[in-house]
């Protein structure tokens, strides 16, 4: 149930961004969640109305964008999405060592408002 703490944090970030815009009516909160976070988008959707209740986001919708894992090979520098079927090896050179580029993020991408 760590999704509740994530969605509460995202709501707090959004409300902080909106504090200087009292006339703005939030319509949609868009967040990005990396596939390696372990955060389940369906639970974010489930807990959003509960966490947003009583806030300016209570009538807003939630959009969750899943960010796939992307790495850069430490040997040849190519970027790729590691796949279990290929034992997570670089498809160009076959090496395993890589640096994570995307897939661990969990952030507010945008807040759509009506002025």
Image: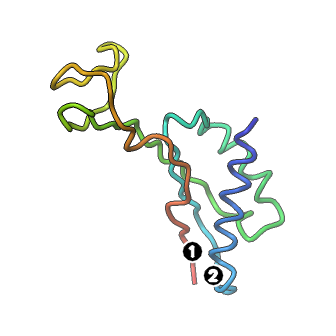
Above/below status of 81 relative to 44: above
**Relative to 57, 112 lies left or right:** left
96 or 82: nearer the viewer:
96
Q: Which mark is residue 99?
A: none
Q: Quadrant of the C terminus?
A: bottom right
Residue drawn at x 71%, y 51% as measured from the top left: 48
- Could you tell me if the residues under marks 2 and 1 are in contact, i.e. CB atoms within 8 Å? yes
Would you identify the image quadrant in which residue 13 lies?
A: bottom right
Above/below status of 42 relative to 23: above
Residues packed near mark 1 inside 10 Å, few (<14), some (14 to 19) or many (20 plus): some
Would you identify the image quadrant in which residue 113 lies?
A: bottom right
Residue drawn at x 69%, y 81% as measured from the top left: 19
72 or 19: nearer the viewer:
72
Residue corresponding to mark 2: 24
Question: Looking at the picture, how far across and down is residue 17, in whole percent?
Answer: 62, 75
Q: Quadrant of the N terminus?
A: top right
Question: Looking at the picture, how far across and down is residue 70, in whole percent?
Answer: 35, 37
Residue corresponding to mark 1: 113
Residue drawn at x 59%, y 33% as measured from the top left: 38
Residue drawn at x 34%, y 14% as measured from the top left: 87
Q: Secondary structure at mark 2?
A: loop
Residues packed near mark 2 inside 10 Å, few (<14), some (14 to 19) or many (20 plus): some
Nearer-N-terminus badge (2/1): 2
Q: Secondary structure at mark 1?
A: strand
Question: Looking at the picture, how far across and down is residue 49, in whole percent?
Answer: 75, 52
Instruction: Looking at this view, name the residue that lies furthest to the right.
Output: 54
Above/below status of 94 relative to 25: above
């Amino acid at each position: 149930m760590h999704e509740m703490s994530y969605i509460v944090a995202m709501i707090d970030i959004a409300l902080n961004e909106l504090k200087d815009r009292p006339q703005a009516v939030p319509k949609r909160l868009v967040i990005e969640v990396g596939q390696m976070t372990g955060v389940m988008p369906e639970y974010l959707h489930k807990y959003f109305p509960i966490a947003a209740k009583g806030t300016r986001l209570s009538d807003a919708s939630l959009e969750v964008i899943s960010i796939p894992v992307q790495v850069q090979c430490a040997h040849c520098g190519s970027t790729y999405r590691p796949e279990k079927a290929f034992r997570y090896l670089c498809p160009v050179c076959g090496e395993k060592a890589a640096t994570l580029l995307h897939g661990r993020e969990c952030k507010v991408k945008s807040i759509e408002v009506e002025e």
